[in-house]
Amino acid sequence: MAAAPISDEDREQVRRLHAAGQSRNQIARAIGRSSSTVSKIARDKGLRFEGGARVAPATAARQLDLAEQRRQLVARLYARASANLDRIEAPEYVRAELLPSGRTARVISAEPPAQDERHHSQAIGSYLSSAARLAEIDAGTGAGEVRSMLTDLARGLRAAFVDDDQPDAGEGTDTGG
């Protein structure tokens, strides 16, 4: 059975209810149409259902929390890099060496062995690179898109609202023009 064609009254009700902040599915229930019909009317009128007004305060608060977490991580990464550098530049290098008996011995030398220095240098480079990438997020710089937890959060929110495009259970798809 074909659904009734979309009327001017349907279009006006969608516009009015959308302006009142109702979701796609709420509007569909209110006017007795499928959510796909509401989507079609909204698209024709240039209306969008993204939930932006509902999630904006939570998104802004989350953005501030993440920015503070990044600042704290940058400070910790710099501290770790500094500690590693201090260790390899110290007047004496202290390390533990495993003896054939299975016990460990404390070994003190003027400089770290080459392998230890290489490992510390790699760790320092990794800490500094990570700190720089985190700083780029807040500075808005970088070669490509800076992906952060906030970007993933925004994608998740968009995906959650895509579900509103699906017809409600028990509704047929309305293809009326």
Image: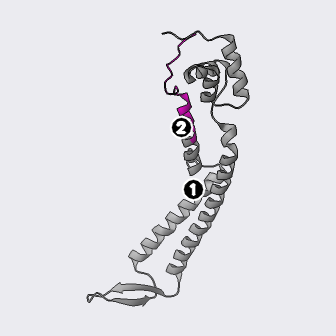
As drawn, the residue found furthest toward the left would be 100
Q: Amino acid at mark 2?
A: Ala
Q: Quadrant of residue 71?
A: bottom right
Query: Picture coordinates of residue 159 (x, y %)?
Result: 53, 37
Question: Is residue 143 at all visible to an observer of this figure?
Answer: no
Instruction: Indicate whether residue 141 is drawn in magenta.
Output: no
Identify the residue at image location x=51%, y=69%.
124
Identify the residue at image location x=62%, y=57%.
135
Compared with 177, 150 (above or below) is: below
Closest to the observer, 23 or 109: 23
What is the number of callouts on the image?
Answer: 2
Q: Which residues are magenta?
A: 157-177
Residue pointed to by mark 1: 133
Residue 21 relative to residue 164: left or right:
right
Query: Picture coordinates of residue 165 (x, y %)?
Result: 54, 28
Residue pointed to by mark 2: 159
Identify the residue at image location x=64%, y=52%.
62
Identify the residue at image location x=50%, y=65%.
125
Compared with 40, 135 (above or below) is: below
Residue 55 relative to residue 106: left or right:
right
Ranked by sequence position, the earlier of labels 1 and 2 is: 1
The alpha-carbon separation of the residues under discs 1 and 2 comes to 27 Å
Instruction: Indicate whether residue 173 is drawn in magenta.
Output: yes
Mark 2 burial class by Cα count in 10 Å: few <14, some 14-19, many 20+:
few
Question: Is residue 9 at all visible to an observer of this figure?
Answer: yes
